[in-house]
Amino acid sequence: MGEFELIRRCFMQARQGAGVVTGIGDDCAVLQVPAGQQLVVSIDTLVEGTHFLPGTPPAEVATRLLGAAVSDLAAAAATPAWLTLALTLPRGDADWVEPFAAALAERACELGISLVGGDTTRGATLTLSAQVHGFVPAGQALLRSGAQVGDRVLVSGTLGDSRGGLETLLQPRPVDADVRYLQQRFHRPEPRVMLAQRLRPLVHAGLDISDGLLADLNHLLEASGVGAEVERDRVPCSAALRRLYPQDAADWALSGGEDFELCLSVAAEQVTACLAEADRLGIRLTEVGRITAEPGLRVLDGSGQLIEGLARGYDHFKEST
């Protein structure tokens, strides 16, 4: 199937949301940013064999791609608006692209984001890039650079589940409720958009957890010029992860990556308000550490002793450095 026929057949019916003057079908999308808002933009790429296993159903690739990309908007406490999509396909296979496009459209509707354009090309490896655009009131974007000494470190949800879900795919085991839960966490990230927006006035700094808590928190510390201590035993793990992988759960919660939960730096006096707001949304929020003046990131055990030799998270180019 040719490129333009593939686009017409699979993507031309995408929902066009507010602010879309001209969407799919022209050289550029023409978009209108609301008055008093700033545009925030991020891009996320998935490569077959690196971010998902060969043979993964296209619908699961779609939900993983969009969830990961929109999570960056959540990290900025932004409202999702528009999406552009770039596909590199080994062949123009409508049997793969059609269910991918259908799942993408359904998930985009759930997340309140509209597909407004993109590109398709042929290449040896299946590669998908989603560029997402969102709005945030002027001057109110949540950044990595505002953490202050004495702040508490909060994380949403449970950590390590995505790594556990990947393990069930790499080393298959009988499918039960725990396996299904972990695989859903891997294939269908849930961006914490509403939580970030509600907490925005209470938070000094934040980001989403894509490379692992330790790696991503370290990015926040470097941007803010501070350090932190994290209590390993307070980092939240799901019951499913602890049941299936009791020996690995704690390490995966620290360094497994791709959970796409939020990591936030919050003044101590605002922690109670943040926890209450999360509870109203039905989202778990846990205090796991504190920001310090001493540079660096330290992980402590239950008795307050420093834990050495922990993995620090995923790095695409670690082997070449």
Image (tube, rainbow, N blue to C red):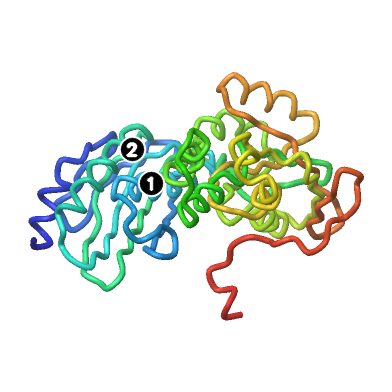
Residue at (83% x, 42% y) in the render? 150
Task: Give the image location of residue 257, x and y in percent.
Answer: 58, 53
Crowdedness of circle 2 by 10 Å Cα count: few (<14), some, many (20+)? some
Q: What kind of element bears circle 1?
A: helix
Q: Quadrant of the C terminus?
A: bottom right
Q: In the image, 92: left or right of 113?
A: left
Q: What residue type is disc 2 on? A: Arg
Q: What residue type is disc 1 on? A: Leu
Q: In which quarter of the image is residue 5?
A: bottom left
Q: List the residue tagged with mark 1.
A: 66
Task: Give the image location of residue 273, x and y in percent.
Answer: 70, 23
Q: Do the residues labelled 2 and 1 touch (CB within 8 Å)?
A: yes
Name the foreground residue: 15 vs 61: 61
Residue at (51% x, 30% y) in the render? 194
Q: How many marks?
A: 2
Name the foreground residue: 111 vs 213: 213
Task: Give the image location of residue 147, x and y in percent.
Answer: 73, 47
Q: List the residue tagged with mark 2.
A: 107
Q: In the image, 11: left or right of 216?
A: left
Name the foreground residue: 308 vs 142: 308
Q: Which mark is residue 314?
A: none
In the rendered image, the residue lying farthest to the top is 280
Above or below, comparing residue 244 to residue 51 in the picture: above
Q: In the image, 148: left or right of 93?
A: right
Task: Give the image location of residue 302, x and y in percent.
Answer: 86, 43
Identify the mark nearer the N-term, 2 or 1. Answer: 1
Q: What kind of element bears circle 2?
A: helix
In the rendered image, the residue lying farthest to the bottom is 320
